[in-house]
Image: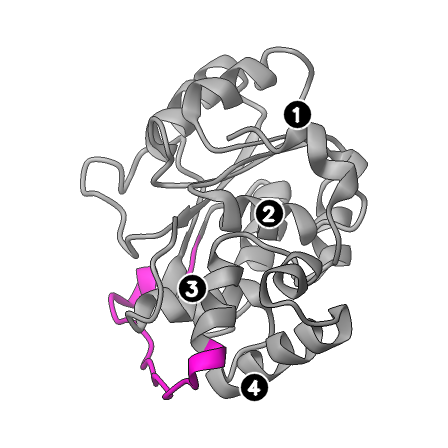
């Protein structure tokens, strides 16, 4: 999937947009597994003119990187085609000054990559669910020429996860969020007003005890409530 042509139509700033925008003055490349993560990270950056590409596969991202200079790459370890480790290694070989932050959906760094010099910053999915703001910390670290590992990767211990019981409507909304739908698209699917859809999303976040849509879906995945496509 290539979301790049549709960046201007995205809505919302859901993940401390100002901090991510300030951290990089140049172009940002985003390579994520699945529509939801791709959309969530794009919507987290308030000035979307900074986003040069938003894509779900390795080779497509490399093709974009060769068209113009980039300062920062945000990627996941798993992609719909290829993987983040190979993408990071190849990108750093081509562009040594490129800064890369990886989101580890598996919460681990494979042993063969643990000490790779090109793997600057890695954030475990579990630490985003736990709201320790590690993604922002990782971006700040690499833009300051430092390496970074999120808390659970440093300690080897995953944070405690509490899984609440959802209502049938909350399950429905969570599934639609995980499919990458906006509140407006959720409203259309459920045949309700935009305001009602926003209320549903807000109640879901409260039930899950999270602060944003990204945390909601990642917690839902970890609790076995939803599958991330």
Image x and y of residue 224, in percent: 28, 69
Q: Secondary structure at mark 4?
A: helix
Image x and y of residue 33, in percent: 42, 41
Q: Is residue 163 magenta?
A: yes
Mark 4 Cα-neighbour bin, 10 Å: few <14, some 14–19, many ≥20: few
- Real-space CA distance between mark 3 and mark 2, rounded to the nearest whole angstrom: 14 Å
Asked if labels 4 and 3 touch by Cβ distance under 8 angstroms, the answer is no
Label drawn at residue 70: 1
Q: Return the disc, 3 or 2, that comes first in the chain's sequence.
A: 2
Q: Return the disc, 1 or 2, that comes first in the chain's sequence.
A: 2
Image x and y of residue 139, in percent: 59, 49
Label drawn at residue 209: none
Q: How is the image coloured?
A: one colour
Q: Is residue 166 magenta?
A: yes
Q: Is residue 43 left or right of residue 204?
A: right
- Real-space CA distance between mark 1 and mark 3, rounded to the nearest whole angstrom: 28 Å
Q: Return the disc, 4 or 2, that comes first in the chain's sequence.
A: 2
Span of residues in magenta: 149-170
Q: Give the mark toward the camera: 1 or 4.
A: 4
Image x and y of residue 164, in percent: 38, 87
Asked if labels 4 and 1 touch by Cβ distance under 8 angstroms, the answer is no
Location of mark 4 (residue)? 206
Q: Return the disc, 1 or 4, that comes first in the chain's sequence.
A: 1
Q: Of all residues shown, which one is farthest toward the front? A: 191
Location of mark 2 (residue)? 39
- Real-space CA distance between mark 1 and mark 2, rounded to the nearest whole angstrom: 19 Å
Q: Is residue 111 left or right of residue 94?
A: left
């Amino acid at each position: 999937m290539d979301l790049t042509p549709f960046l201007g139509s995205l809505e919302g700033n859901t993940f401390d947009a100002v901090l991510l925008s300030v951290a990089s003055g140049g172009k940002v490349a985003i390579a994520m597994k699945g529509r939801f993560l791709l959309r969530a990270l794009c919507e987290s950056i308030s000035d979307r003119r900074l986003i040069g590409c938003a894509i779900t596969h390795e080779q497509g991202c490399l093709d974009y990187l060769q068209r113009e200079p980039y300062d920062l790459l945000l990627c996941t370890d798993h992609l719909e085609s290829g993987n983040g480790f190979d993408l990071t290694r190849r990108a750093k070989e081509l562009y040594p000054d490129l800064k890369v932050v990886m989101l580890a959906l598996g919460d681990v760094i494979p042993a063969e990559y643990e000490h790779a010099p090109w793997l600057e910053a890695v954030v475990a999915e579990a630490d985003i669910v736990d709201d320790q703001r590690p993604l922002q910390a990782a971006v700040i670290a690499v833009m300051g020429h430092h390496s970074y590992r999120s808390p659970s990767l440093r300690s080897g211990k995953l944070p405690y996860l509490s899984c609440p019981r959802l209502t049938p409507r909350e399950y429905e909304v969570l599934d639609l969020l995980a499919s990458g739908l906006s509140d407006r698209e959720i409203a259309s699917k459920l045949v309700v007003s935009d305001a009602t859809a926003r209320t549903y999303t807000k109640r879901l976040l409260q039930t899950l005890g999270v602060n944003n849509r990204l945390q909601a879906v990642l917690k839902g995945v970890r609790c076995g409530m939803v599958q991330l496509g």
